[in-house]
Image (tube, helix red, strand yellow):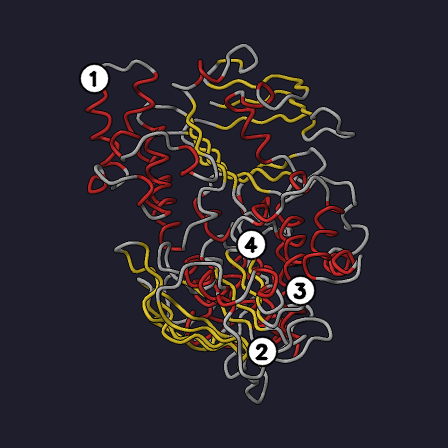
Amino acid sequence: MISFDRVGFAYEGTAAPVLRDLDLVVDEGELAVVVGPTGAGKSTLLGLVNGLVPRFTGGRLTGRVSVGGLDVRHHPPRELAHLVGVVGQDPLAGFVTDTVEEELAYGMEQLAVPPPAMRKRVEETLDLLGIAELRDRPVRELSGGQQQRVAIGSVLTAHPRVLVLDEPTSALDPTAAEEVLAAVTRLVHDLGITVMMAEHRLERVVQHADRVLLLAGDGTLAAGPPAHVLADSELAPPVMQLGRLAGWQPQPVSVREARRLAGPLRERLNGAVPAPPARSAPAARSAPAAPAAPVLTARRVTVRYHDTVAVAGVDLVVRAGEVVALMGRNGSGKSSLLWALQGAGPRSGGRVEIRGSHGPGGPDNPAGVDPAALSNRQARHHVALVPQTPSDLLYLDTVAGELGAADREARLPPGSTRARLDRLLPPPDALGDHAHPRDLSEGQRLLLVLAIQTVAAPPVVLLDEPTRGLDVAAKHRFVGTVGELAANGHAVVVATHDVELVATLAHRVVVLAQGEVIADGPTAQVVAASPAFAPQVAKVMAPQPWLTVAQVREALAGA
């Protein structure tokens, strides 16, 4: 169905090609998952399938890419629209109508599909994806998982034979992600649609894949069954890393396969006590033996948007040196709560108090201050927030410009923010002064914004979905950074859907549902008991309380 024949591609002005001499065939009805580090060429590879690359990106293409027998070099994307459906990372950005039914019909209108056929296809797609009850709903009021299924449906109504998905689950909670992946798997198995999907969170998708396409970052590609391609890769999901540690052959790619092999390992670890999750994080520390002083105290915080209650009287206490994970399905109120805590977002009721030093050499505030009562300049010395899209806070043309502006805003000596950034990204990864922030990778932008937001040493750091779009190396660096913040006494609250991050990093987990706290306790206690939020190792090793491969490795080494 999809054929790459000695394909190479290089963007203008780059020293090395992104792809080189690729020979690849993706068969009809195959689910191929594209993996690799940030910048390895995953989006480029996907863009070649329908000709968006290089027609809309520039660059030099060599070799031949064909889809359904059509050479994409000679057929522009509009001529491939009936054959290839593309869904980007942000489905909301691609919607052009107001309601679900209108969105499903829009693409067919552009292809001049007769109205009777349009109506039939809309009904079939609503049933196929399980979204019939949403037909009259405004697309902007749907949950993230619902929006993703509607985005897939909007291209399915054209009856494409190929579906291209770019990180379809990156912004979704675990349950919504499973719903989307179940819909995709059904398309492959029942309709024979060929799917190429790029994804960083392999623990979600690898068990569904027929093949993994691993881009190494040097332009080369390895393709084959997941267990073979990822056998020795650092990108392997936790269940495969656990199999590697235990010596299981063949390596399992799903929790079901791993549980069948895990009996002897559980017996070997019977009676052992896992290390606290944060000890598995570089530069992090375990939860304090004696309770530290509260740094963030929120009482009865309420957020309303017109008639909708997003946060319903939440109480939250976070102590110095504590990392708290804020979890819950899309739309549960996590982001609204973070912005209310930071002070810039709406708050209909309740009070927030932050105690502790508010900057280098600054006095303590033992009585507590409410950041909502402060100016933005004052508030940044008490609380920092990194939003879901860090680039929203970057508005200048160079890294040096952003760093200098942060120094002036925080009233710190020139070079203060640069010094902080260099601790987060030491050589050879350090960012050049003249680099444009929009040209940085997701991980680089995240750490740049984190340096800017925390240079004033606020006692509270709030992070909203910080690992969205990060590869393994960038996530590892981020974990070390958060561990360092906690070790230095900051209180950190991380809103995330990344259950593996939570297992590695968090001392405590708070779960929201419909704006209310439904669970609050130690990480192992909360996530291990949840079918939705349990990490892979917890599912494999249950009923024993293991959360991460690092914990198991440490226990085996001490046995």
Q: Which residue is mark 3?
A: 480
Image quarter in which the C terminus is found:
bottom right
Residue type (three-letter) at the residue carrying disc 4: Thr
Pointer 2 or 3: first along the chain: 2
- Residue 11 placed where, x, y %? 69, 26
What separation in Å lies between label 1 and label 2 (alpha carbons)? Answer: 62 Å
Q: Secondary structure at mark 3?
A: helix
Pointer 4 or 1: first along the chain: 1
Which one is nearer the viewer's eye here, 535 or 6?
Answer: 535
Q: Which residue is mark 2?
A: 275
Q: Residues within 10 Å of mark 2 (few under 14, many from 20)?
A: some
In the rendered view, tell whether residue 467 sits above or below residue 152.
below
Residue type (three-letter) at the residue carrying disc 3: Gly
What separation in Å lies between label 1 and label 3 (alpha carbons)? Answer: 56 Å
Q: Residues within 10 Å of mark 3 (few under 14, many from 20)?
A: some
The answer to whether 17 appears left or right of 255 in the picture is: right
What separation in Å lies between label 2 and label 3 (alpha carbons)? Answer: 17 Å
- Residue 240 placed where, x, y %? 55, 56
Q: Residue at x 59, y 36 (%)?
A: 42
Pointer 1 or 2: first along the chain: 1
Q: Which residue is mark 4?
A: 467
Which one is nearer the viewer's eye here, 360 or 310?
Answer: 360
The answer to whether 286 appears left or right of 82 in the picture is: right
In the rendered view, tell whether residue 164 sits above or below residue 378.
above
Q: Secondary structure at mark 1?
A: helix
The answer to whether 144 appears left or right of 105 in the picture is: right
